[in-house]
Image (tube, grey):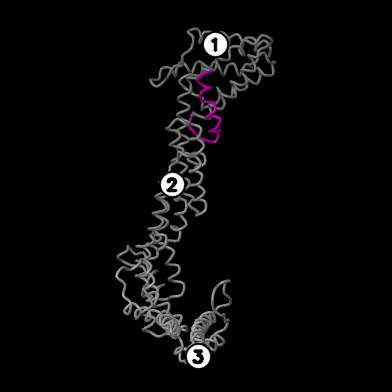
Amino acid sequence: MMSALCETEQTENGLVEAVAVLISKMPRMRVELSEGKLGECYKVKPDYMKAWEKWRAQITKLDSSAFWVQCNHQLTREGLKNMLQIMLGNSNSLCAAACHWLELYIANLLYVRPFTTGLESMYSLAQKCMQLKPSSNAHRLVELMIGILGENTEVVLAECSRAFGPWMVAHAIELLTAGSDEAEVILHEERHNLGEISIAELHRLVYAQVLSSHVLTWQIAPIYLISCMKQGMGLLELLLYKQSVQNNELLLKNIEICRLYDLDSVSSNIMKIAGVYHWKHGRKGAGVFWLQQARDEVRLNRIAQHLFDSVGKSISDESFKQWEGLIELLGSETKAAGGLEFLHKYRDFKKSLKQVHLGKTTDSAKQAVESLISLMKNTSTPPRFWLPLLYDSLKLLNWQERPLLTVPQTNLLLNKLQELSMARLRPDFTEVELPQQALSSVRLALATNLGRAILEE
């Protein structure tokens, strides 16, 4: 009795071991398997096919073995026999063991049709598995996979959009068109109902819009917009114009994007916008800088005229110091009628005159005289500044050591005083505030200097 039980148990263990060995020897068309994975690898198809047929023959041989009669444990016997039927590809066993049509689908590819190739065959098998194992609630990936297997481009895009959003759709297009001429036509054909753009361009535009709506990702949007031949460049320009010019770092990034995509006119306009914004908000230096970068001569001339008018209300040191930095920044190239040219010459005159008042030598005084004569000769110097300039130069006119002005130079200045009398009669003439005795003091100084100059000559 004990002997019979032991023999039955040995048979049962032997069957379990035999099935386990067959599972571990399942052929796989792979270069290698990671450690712990079951199966034997084959690199080429002929070797794999031979091993596959041999393996199935071994399963069939075990399935028809007489040892099953000696296995008295019903659950073990039925379980092992069922595993063998699954490995042999029995459709009933596969369908009963699978919980989902995808499991049945993979089981068929493993045990029934391991040489299946081409999307058409795979799609047909998937349809069959779905009929045998219908699912009540489909996962979002399932519809996507069915669309891929069925080579249905529209379905794939719709499912990508529904399940993953615009990023996936924009990049799925590259995969769909990689090996399909039909998908290439569908996705890149211009469509009237889309405003004469293609489906591919539409989805890139949608994703670019998503990127451009966030402060951290808007800089990536140009990469997608530049690939949209119909509407991309127009939308890229709008995106760049929308960016704030308040932040200097953001402004520089904006200009760099313009440089990368050869948008010189857009870059120039952005710098003009930045210049006007900073000027209006009190950042005069930054405003002038960006307008200079944009080469906006019209606005620079207006600013120069504004500076001239502001300084022109008074020629005092205090008024000039307020604007001297901007005058220097604007440079002498900006052409504003009667504006910057006079202000730059006036600045040089003031520097020379300051050296004289600090007790410098006669050479400094002569240099100041040269600046004065240059100002008085220049047509850009407004008549209302003639008397203030002469009044500032009284120390030069009354120089004790020797007369600094020659006879022709003195006559020039006297003629300017005469012309000033006529200019004052015009309604648009503006007087500069000076002491009451300023005119008489200048006349006396010029007359004295003229006499001294004549005697010296």
> Closer to us: mark 2 or mark 3?
3
Which comes before the other along the chain, label 2 or label 1?
A: 2
Question: In this orientation, which residue lies closer to the viewer: 117 or 415?
Answer: 117
Q: Secondary structure at mark 2?
A: loop
Q: Are marks 2 and 3 in contact (CB under 8 Å)?
A: no
Residue under circle 3?
A: 57
Which comes before the other along the chain, label 2 or label 3?
A: 3
Q: Secondary structure at mark 3?
A: helix
Q: Is residue 34 above or below residue 1?
A: above
- Check if residue 443 falls in the magenta segment: no
Q: Secondary structure at mark 1?
A: helix
Q: Is residue 40 above or below residue 436?
A: below
- The residue drawn where x is 45% and y is 33% is 279
- Check if residue 324 falls in the magenta segment: yes
Query: Tag 3: Cα neighbours inside 10 Å, few (<14), some, or many (≥20)?
Result: few
Q: Is residue 129 above or below residue 160?
A: below
Determine if residue 428 is in view: yes
> Closer to us: mark 1 or mark 3?
3
Residue under circle 2?
A: 215
Residue 19 horizontal side relative to residue 190, left or right: right
The amino acid type found where label 1 is placed reads: Val
Q: Which quarter of the picture shows residue 154?
A: bottom left
**Count of marks, rendered view:** 3
Question: In this orientation, which residue lies closer to the viewer: 281 or 314?
Answer: 281
Residue 319 horizontal side relative to residue 134, left or right: right
Residue under circle 1?
A: 442
Query: Tag 1: Cα neighbours inside 10 Å, few (<14), some, or many (≥20)?
Result: many
x, y (%) of residue 66?
47, 92
Q: Is residue 50 above or below residue 378?
A: below
x, y (%) of residue 233?
42, 56
